[in-house]
Amino acid sequence: MEKFHGVDYYGIEELLSDEERMIRDAVRDWVEAEFLPVVTEHHRAGTFPVHLIPKLGELGVFGATLKGYGCAGLNHVAYGLIMQELERGDSGLRSAASVQSGLVMHPIHAYGSEAQKEAWLPLLATGAKVGCFGLTEPDHGSDPGSMKTRARRQGDAFVLSGTKLWITNGSIADVAVVWAKEDDGEIGGFLVERGTPGFSTLDIHGKFSMRASITSELSFQDCRIPLANKLPSVRGLRGPLGCLSQARYGIAWGAVGAAMACYDWALQYAQQRVQFGKPIASFQLVQQKLVWMLTEITKAQLLALQLGRLKDQGTARAQQISMAKMNNVQMALDTARMARDIMGAAGIVDEHPVIRHMLNLETVNTYEGTHDIHTLIIGRDITGLDGFGL
Ligand code: TGC
Ligand code: FAD
């Protein structure tokens, strides 16, 4: 009987086009050659390899589904495969690409003026400029609609005041997409450029998760934003939530990549590690764990792929994206914990990537809507009843 190798148990490879496979392989090769050799030192230091940002731009990962403005115009499945391969490296690497693409370039492309698009999109696509997305506040995470940040109209400017917390790439961003309530209480989006008087950032230290990623606080103290920096084509919570749909979609694929890395590693380890005179992979309980991981990864791959095809048809619903984000991240976290367990003591050191993925996935479970918030989004969809306690 032919032995199975790899993490494609159902021949999903055959469901991809040549172009999709080629893009995936190019990103996979790049991550292996350029990112994996440096990730451990960055994880230890709590830094992000910023020198790789322009290289990600050269690879075409930023805003990859957007058309025009120097963007690649790929389909959503190809974009998902890119996210899978980046997160196979590290969730922080995928985060950098998710934020730049889904949370910064998408809102500028979808809600921005022509001048804003021309000014920012080509530079963000190459990685010459970096963006961040400010929605969460110290007192408002799962419930962003209650945000306190205000944008008051004063003459030829908006005056921004408030604080955003837990912002990926906040301190290295050239532009922040910031969501704030205007005078009438409606939410608007604003492009805040680095160096604007009254705008400052502070990095968050002491993280045990997403160490190879920058997470910051953004502070706005009577910060004057020109009228031309307001995103003109959206108002209300659906503005930021529309961006989250893009990023959550990428996470659904990215989580599969992290799980594949953990499964791969644990399988090889179990085949080599000998206890009681036999490879631990020969023990039924270890096999049960490996089989569970591969089965769940396979289901998650199919969920992500079909969601991608729905997105490419233009029929994917936000609630379907919630299901894939919720399921695939939980699956990846469980897989990482199981892989760590299979590796015994060796599983806790960063010589192996498993503990890094496991710790990162605690964040991925929380950001872009916690697992429970997505459960409630789907619960509301299928029952018509609001479980948020509103
Ligand atoms: P609700 O009544 O549900 O919605 C308000 C309006 O928004 C529309 N909408 C959406 N539009 C597009 N995409 C979506 N996913 C949408 N979800 C809702 C909705 O139709 C409505 O539109 P309209 O025109 O009728 O007004 O609002 P709610 O207040 O009841 O519900 C909110 C809830 C809990 C679902 C939502 O606030 C939520 O998703 N909370 C979680 C917050 C969150 O995910 N934060 C993420 C912050 S960014 C981040 O984590 C980046 S991590 C970056 C990295 O990768 O490093
Ligand atoms: P809370 O909302 O306080 O939730 C705490 C707990 O209560 C959770 O378990 C939650 O599920 C539960 N809960 C809340 N409400 C309910 C309810 N109605 N019913 C049942 N349970 C409920 N945000 C940005 O805007 N931009 C970024 O770039 C960004 N990057 C991030 C990077 C990192 C490393 C991290 C950790 C976070 C990032 N975030 C970012 C913030 C992230 O989106 C929030 O942490 C997340 O939305 C949850 O908010 P919270 O942490 O305030 O938790």
Image (spheres, rainbow, N blue to C red):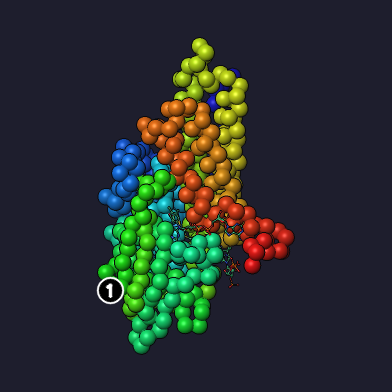
When the figure is inspected, residue 309 is found, relative to residue 197, above or below; the finding is above
Q: Nearer the viewer, residue 146 or 155?
A: 146
Residue 69: percent from the left, percent from the top? 36, 65
Q: Nearer the viewer, residue 168 or 5?
A: 168
Which residue is at a point 60% across and 41% down the rendered structure image? Answer: 299
From the image, which quarter does the C terminus lie in? Answer: bottom right
- Residue in front for this viewpoint, 384 or 311: 384
Specify the farthest residue to the right. 383
x, y (%) of residue 171? 32, 60
Determine whether, in the image, residue 177 is placed left or right of residue 129: right
Residue 96 as seen in the image, left or right of residue 185: left
Judging by the rendered image, the residue that carries numbered circle 1 is 197
* Left or right: 31 in relation to 20: left
Q: Residue at x 57, y 52 (%)?
A: 371
Q: Going by the picture, which residue comes out furthest to the bottom?
A: 155
Image height of 296 relative to 275, above or below: below
Residue 234 percent across, percent down from the top left: 49, 74
Residue at 44% over, 70% down: 179
Q: Tag 1's secondary structure? A: loop
Residue drawn at 38 percent across, 76 percent down: 160
Q: Quadrant of the N terminus?
A: top right
